[in-house]
Amino acid sequence: MKTKKELKEMYKQMKIPMGVFQIKNIKNNKVLIDHSIDMQSKWNRHKMELKFGNHRNGSLQKDWNKYGEENFVFEVLSELKKKKEENINYDKELKTLQEMVTEELNTESIYK
């Protein structure tokens, strides 16, 4: 069995993708843009909220109920690599990256 120290070191070495992603409705091409330092966990949270019918974005929830889970896809739009410097505010960097990605999209296609 591994020690706490070994487990902590293993966790630090894990490559958890962080970046900007979209949840896309393939029926009407509308998207929800979001970001996270752990994209897979955030996607799972969105899915659970949608499945339970209590997602904070009412328009997305309405379409999820109408079209079903099979008509939504998770797509990574931009990934941010971890840097060697220690004092980096990744959340701030991801918010900026999300704003840049959102500006490039047609705002009519974004769930508000």
Image (spheres, grey):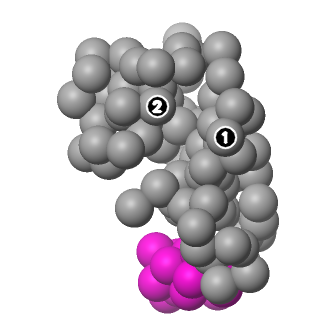
17 is higher (above) or lower (below) than 65: below
Label for residue 63? 2
Image location of residue 109, percent across then percent down: 62, 60
Seen from the viewer's position, the closer of residues 86 and 94 is 94
Residue 100 in magenta? yes
Residue 43 in magenta? no
Residue at left offset 36%, top offset 33%: 61
Marks 1,2: beta carbons within 8 A: yes
98 is higher (above) or lower (below) than 33: below
* Residue at disc 1, secondary structure: loop
The magenta segment is 84-101
31 is higher (above) or lower (below) than 4: below
* Residue at disc 2, secondary structure: helix
Kind of residue sitting beneath label 1: Asn
- Does the rendering let one see residue 12? no
Kind of residue sitting beneath label 2: Asp
Q: In the figure, is residue 1 to the left or right of 53?
A: right
Q: In the figure, is residue 72 to the left or right of 38?
A: right
Seen from the viewer's position, the closer of residues 24 and 37 is 24
Seen from the viewer's position, the closer of residues 110 and 85 is 110
Residue at left offset 66%, top offset 15%: 70
> In terms of sequence position, does the residue under pointer 1 or pointer 2 come before the other?
1
Residue at left offset 67%, top offset 40%: 28
| Quadrant placement of the C terminus | bottom left
Image location of residue 103, percent across then percent down: 65, 84
